[in-house]
Amino acid sequence: MKKLTKLVATLMAMVLLLSLCGCGDESKKVVGKWSYEIDLQDAIMEEMGSEEFADFKSTLPVIMYFDFQDGGKLELTVDEDAFLDAYEKWLSDFCSFAADYLYQTAADSGMTKDDVDSMFGGNAEDYFREMMNEEVDPIDLVKEMKNSGVWKAKGGKLYISEGDKVEANRYDNYKIDGDTMTITLPEGATQEELIPGMEYPLTLKKVN
């Protein structure tokens, strides 16, 4: 499951490539902490790319925080406790599905559930959980989902980039209505899915 670690790292890098623009000087309205929720289920399934799991349905919500700070620094973090709880539920769903799939496949070959369990030295679901725990540390995933960059408001546009310098050609349209920021593509830009489950328009909620 090294693909999962790569996925979350890619997610945060791609988020930093988003840039926002609006009408007027909105910098004071942007400063602060905003949340965005994404479900990584589809992205994980695409990364796994296995037909055996094509019918697996679950959710893995991640609450991301955009902290636009005075001075132009941007910090990207996630709600660690919420993610760990969501990951545990997703892992239980996944291991249950994988075990049921294995039992059904074995039954088609004339094997019983006990036959399968004896091959793995115990319950198949426990085997899959042990295997996943060896491959994926959710704490490490949380660390991978942290990132930082810079932002700058100029001429009615708000730019976001990695590193310590904004890129002048990266920006999106945005609108702030109360505690909601809606991000859309600039006119003429091609609509695209950033990763499975993350596409325009993006809706951020003000936290503080």
Image (cartoon, helix red, strand yellow):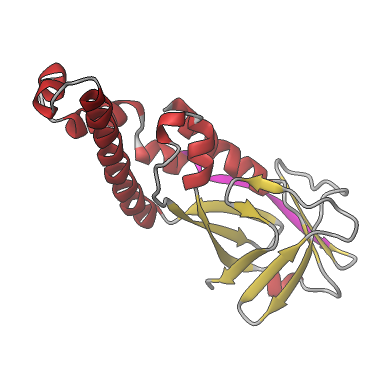
Give x and y (percent) for residue 93: 30, 45
Q: Nearer the viewer, residue 82 or 59?
A: 59
How many marks on residues? 0
Side of 208 where 201 appears, left or right: right
Q: Residue at x 69, y 63 (%)?
A: 201
Residue lying at 10% horizontally and 20% vertically, measured from the top left: 118
Q: Residue at x 27, y 37 (%)?
A: 95
Left or right for 53, reference 11: left
* Snapshot quadrant of residue 26: bottom right
Q: Is residue 151 magenta?
A: yes
Q: Main secondary structure of the magenta part?
A: strand
Q: Position of residue 160 (x, y in %)?
A: 74, 52
Residue, far bottom: 178
Quadrant of residue 143 within the rendered picture: top left
On screen, residue 157 versus residue 9, left or right, reads: right
Q: Nearer the viewer, residue 130 or 59?
A: 59
Residue interval drawn in magenta: 144-153
- In depth, the one of 131 and 172 nearer the eye is 131
Is 182 included in the stretch rendered in magenta? no
Quadrant in which the N terminus appears: top left
Quarter of the rendering occupied by the C terminus: bottom right
Q: Residue 32 in the image: state x and y as whole percent.
A: 61, 68
Residue 133 image point, x, y percent? 28, 31
User: For the point 59% across and 60% down, which residue is it?
Assistant: 67
- The image quadrant that residue 156 belongs to is bottom right
Left or right of 174, for residue 88? left
